[in-house]
Image: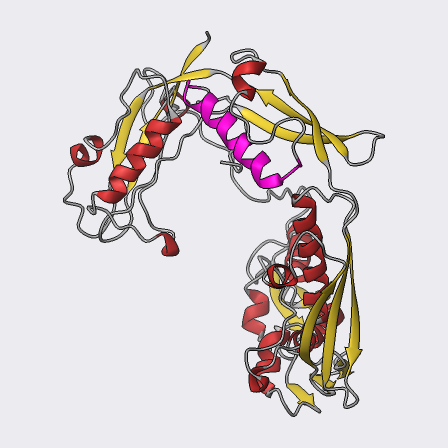
Amino acid sequence: MNQRTLQFRGLIALSLLAASITSAFGQAGAARNAIPSGAQAGSGPSLPAIGPQFENTGPQRVVFAVRIVGNESVPESKVRSYMKTMAGRNYNPDVVEQDVRTLVSSRLFHNAKTYTQETAQGLVVTFQVFERPTIRYIKFIGNEDLSDDTLLKKSGLKVGDALELYSIDEAVSKIEQYYHSVGYVGARVYVQEGNQPQHKGVVIVVHEGKPINVAATNFVGNTIVSGSRLKTLIKTVPGTLMIFAGKLDEKALVEDIDKLTAYYRGLGYFRARISRELEYSSSGEWVTVTFVVDEGPRYTVRNVSFIGNKIFDNEALGKDLDLKPGETYVQDKMDKDLNRIRRLYGSQGYCFSEIQAEPRFGLEPGVLDLVYNVKEGNQYRVGNVVVKIEGDYTHTRRTVALNRLSIRPGDIIDVREIEASKRRLRASQLFQDSPQMGIQPQIVVLPPDGLEMDMKRR
């Protein structure tokens, strides 16, 4: 077996704040930062200057004055803060060109031009800037049920921002989507002012319409799952009381259909189709939503196979599977089998093995083959175990954490022991354990230098 040493690092939360445990399984990367023998920090050849380098080979002319024109709302001092061309310095056209690029990239101006003039006192350089229009005011017209403050917050606009058409259009879209999400599916929003270069502010007009409440949610065509169970998966449901009725949201309706479809496919109904029908009351203020379910055939597993496995044979990988040939496909069972195979490899030091499940469909309806693709990778042993404790009052000794670990340098890595060590650290009550805040003892395994893999999945 090819055994390699791996460095792992992890985080542990202290009882006061957060702490980290860095367990290193593998080769240290200190060599990357080492100073060559005989060298001293700070010695060696000088580095090239950082930043733009300008070269002027012509006759030197001294700048007598720099003038700024065209700025209305942007103070002259702020314009000059972006420039390197100054009175008393030698004139350099490259520097002037760089100043123009800097001014435009500041997004305060959509263009800038320069002019030079020889005078008796010397060279005068003029920068003419063309300001981007800025939002000087924001107004809303027609909103009665939602306040100006609410709409302003949802729009994302601020006084002083650049008056740009795409930003205004995006704000209108956000406001309209918000209205729809709270039941005003007929609300329409448009710009009255702010879409022309000469405008100084933004005026948004709102036609709210009437909010539409969900009176009832029904399901038809479902045979394998009850309507009560399906209703727990979606957002489009009536409120608990008539005065707290659920609101119709078109975006939520689309998401509900996607959730229901995914749920059915997880049960083996890969051809399930979900649609919806809306029936409005005479007043137009209430709607009954009916989800129409076309379940289609339910798929069963014909064969289960493994590709790429060498350490464990097919019998070892397949003997404890929940989802076997001849059984109805259920995604939860397949996910459990995936985790079981991953833990089997992880218990023998193959902590970075990659196993993926792939349902394959043939010409025969209602039947699929399940293929597990295995990339075993290398086997690893524990290298160093380094504990780092952080917090306001870090009095806990590192041996306190080490004593609760069942992993030692030289051991073949076993993910089961890593999980057990994590549980002991949490149960010790010596470290802060608040999963809802994202603070808890953690042990995170990192690969050695040069090993490429997808760490996000872990």
Q: Which residues are magenta?
A: 328-349
Residue 207: name its quadrant. Answer: bottom right
Q: Is residue 345 magenta?
A: yes
Query: x%, y% of residue 64?
Result: 60, 64
**Farthest residue, direction front:** 223
- Residue 334: x and y, percent? 59, 34
Instruction: Determine if residue 157 is in view.
Output: no
Q: Is residue 434 magenta-colored?
A: no
Q: Quadrant of residue 181?
A: bottom right
Placement of 115 over or under 286, stated as above or below: above
- Is the residue 85 above or below the residue 197 in the image? above
Q: Position of residue 53 (x, y in %)?
A: 59, 42
Query: Which of these two is toward me, 216 or 345?
Result: 216
For residue 211, above or below residue 16: below
Which residue sits at x=70%, y=76%?
A: 180
Residue drawn at the location 59% of the way across and 68% of the way down: 79
Q: Determine whether, in the image, residue 183 is placed left or right of residue 349.
A: right
